[in-house]
């Protein structure tokens, strides 16, 4: 199932993320893709708010992984600077991907075959100066209801 949404400004992108975050549960994985500046971190900030995270969410570009505490922990992974898929084994990603929190992965396409089968894929693209087209898809039953609910918002 695929759902496409257009947001008009950062506030709407954060609100979409907030709604999504409030519908996530431990073990959920969100794979974000899109060009630089498309709004991946902005959407993640909203997801964090929906999860009850109070700490500031910023791009973890230099540390690759940030852990945020909330009602449900948020594991925010940014693979922008990942040089090789082979380095993923050194990061200990399994404890995040299969842990007790929600995992959001920016630049998820850089994980290649390491991406789990059950995840929500979100592709963001620029649609104007302040607009973003956001496509959500998954082949997993877990996400069908979430994507359908989103269409009612």
Image (cartoon, helix red, strand yellow):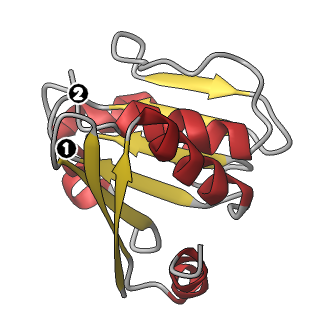
Residue 70 position, x and y percent, is 81, 34
- Name the element at disc 2: loop
Q: Residue at x 55, y 22 (%)?
A: 66
Residue 93 in view, yes or no: no
Tell which residue pokes out farthest to the right in this image: 71
**Does label 1 or label 2 sit earlier along the sequence?**
2
In the image shown, does 110 or 150 lie closer to the viewer? Answer: 150
Distance of label 1 from label 2 (alpha carbons): 8 Å
Q: Give the number of the disc on residue 80.
A: 2
Q: Give the number of the disc on residue 87.
A: none
Above or below, comparing residue 15 to residue 22 in the picture = above
Tell which residue pokes out farthest to the top in this image: 62
- Name the element at disc 1: helix
Q: How many marks?
A: 2
Q: Residue at x 35, y 10 (%)?
A: 62
* 50 left or right, relative to 153: right
Per the image, the residue denoted by label 1 is 110
**Quadrant housing residue 120:** bottom left
Residue 51 position, x and y percent, is 74, 44
Image quadrant holding the N terminus, namely: bottom left
In the image shown, does 20 or 67 lie closer to the viewer? Answer: 20
Above or below, comparing residue 80 to residue 38 in the picture = above
Residue 153 in view, yes or no: yes
């Amino acid at each position: 199932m695929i759902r496409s949404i257009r947001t008009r400004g950062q506030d709407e992108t954060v609100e979409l993320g907030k709604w999504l975050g409030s519908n996530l549960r431990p073990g959920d994985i969100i794979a974000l893709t899109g060009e630089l500046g498309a709004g991946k971190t902005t959407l993640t900030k909203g997801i964090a708010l929906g999860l009850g995270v109070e700490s500031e969410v910023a791009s973890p570009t230099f540390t690759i992984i940030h852990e945020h505490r909330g009602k449900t922990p948020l594991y925010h992974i940014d693979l922008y600077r990942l040089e090789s898929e082979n380095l993923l084994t050194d990061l200990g990603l399994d404890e995040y991907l299969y842990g007790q929190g929600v995992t959001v992965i920016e630049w998820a396409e850089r994980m290649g075959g390491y991406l789990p089968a059950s995840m929500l894929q979100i592709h963001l693209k620029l649609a104007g100066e302040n607009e973003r087209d956001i496509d959500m898809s998954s082949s997993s039953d877990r996400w069908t209801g979430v994507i359908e609910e989103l269409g009612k918002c």
